[in-house]
Image (tube, helix red, strand yellow):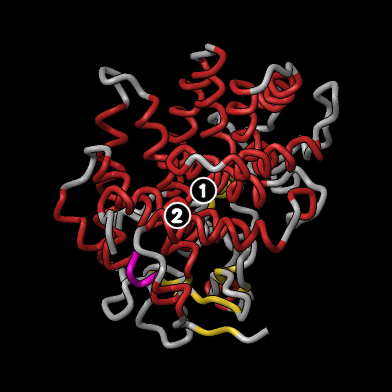
Amino acid sequence: MAVVKKNDRRNLLKTPLDWGKAACDSLMATYTPEKLPPEGRWHYHQGVFLYSMLQLNEQVGREDYFKYIKGYVDHIIDEDGNFYFAREELDAIQAGLLLFKLDQEINDPRYKIAATKLKNIFPTFNTTSDGGFWHKDKYPYQMWLDGLYMGGVFALNYDKAFGEPELLDMVVEQEKLMRKHTRDEKTGLYYHAWDEKRQQPWADSDTGKSPEFWGRAIGWYGITFNEILSFLPGDHPSRAEIVGALKDLIKGLVEFQDQDTGLWYQVVDKGNDINNWLETSCSALFTYTIARAINDGHADDRYKEFAVKGFRGLLDRMEFNDKGLFVMPGICIGTGVGNYQHYLDRPTCENDLHGVGSFILACLEMQKLLPEL
């Protein structure tokens, strides 16, 4: 199918929210809810996209968006609140973020039942010796950056909806452990993973850290910083520490933003390598992280120029097909932990759900910073 970068459709999009709607409408025109890939699974790919749609719907009030989200959930969860999900991994929890709004809006107990099933698996996870959740059972003794977002934001929302404050304490502790084991003091960035046993081929023999700063994993972490802060009471003893960590991350990110395009690289700190490449999903997540930190009062307004540059760089990369539907290119497919070449060799795709979801999130925060393009 022919793809063009400039056309009349692009010129009609006057605000960041217009771009977010174009992204949602494109995937809705391409897939029925039950066919969203990976088809038939309770999975974070669908969760990231549909939760971003849910948040967009709070701003634009589209009934078809809400029905679409409900259609996905109702296809997976039966009339008794039963559903299949991978109980041994943090990734399976993220789509639970869709359940809270459904529970609020619809008189149907199965959404809370399903959410409680997800909440109840936290105590069953295997942990490192200091209490950090393994990312998956098949990755023993490993903590991955992605996992804090995949499970943590759900736990925060469950506490808010149903009053279980120990979940907030759990998330704060998990973030503290993740930061302890993966943060790089020099750059303020975060390595993709940590292996307590130092057994993985990628693990540093002294620290257990993986060797590279993979963009999208750091992006999930940036989201989680902002989310935790939105739930923490103002007088919480960890608040200042987490705000400081978020500021340090933003300071590190802007150091590695590509000056020509405003985007960020697949391996964030190696933009000088001709073999490294600009990646759109991490660029969207970093733009979101910076913009939301400014909007929520955690970062200085001086960082606005970096968020604006990142967002405009994203818009320059977005395309439309010959049906006038939005296309997001250059999204790294799902990626495990590895060495530098591992990340460079990962394929890219168009309109991958966690890429489009990340873009919509950036649109939501940029609407507040840049209401007209």
Residue depicted at 51% across the width and 76% down the height: 319
Contact between marks 2 and 1 (CB within 8 A): the answer is yes
Could you say which disc has been placed on residue 110 in the image?
none
Q: For this rendering, which residue is in front, 68 or 339?
A: 68
What residue occupies the far top of the structure in this picture?
Answer: 163
Q: Which residue is mark 2?
A: 218
Could you say which disc has been placed on residue 145 in the image?
1
The residue under label 1 is which amino acid type? Leu
The quadrant holding residue 329 is bottom right
Q: Which residues are magenta?
A: 311-315
Spatial CA distance of label 2 from label 1 is 7 Å
Q: Residues within 10 Å of mark 2 (few under 14, many from 20)?
A: many
The percent coordinates of residue 216 (x first, y second) are 50, 59
Residue depicted at 37% across the width and 69% down the height: 269
Is residue 260 a member of the stretch shown in magenta?
no
Q: For this rendering, which residue is in front, 215 or 50?
A: 50
Q: For this rendering, which residue is in front, 239 or 313?
A: 313
Q: Quadrant of the C terminus?
A: bottom left
Left or right: 200, with 137 as reference point: left
Left or right: 241, with 17 as reference point: left
> Could you say whether the residue bearing mark 2 is in a helix, strand or loop?
helix
> Could you say whether the residue bearing mark 1 is in a helix, strand or loop?
helix
The percent coordinates of residue 234 (x first, y second) are 27, 21
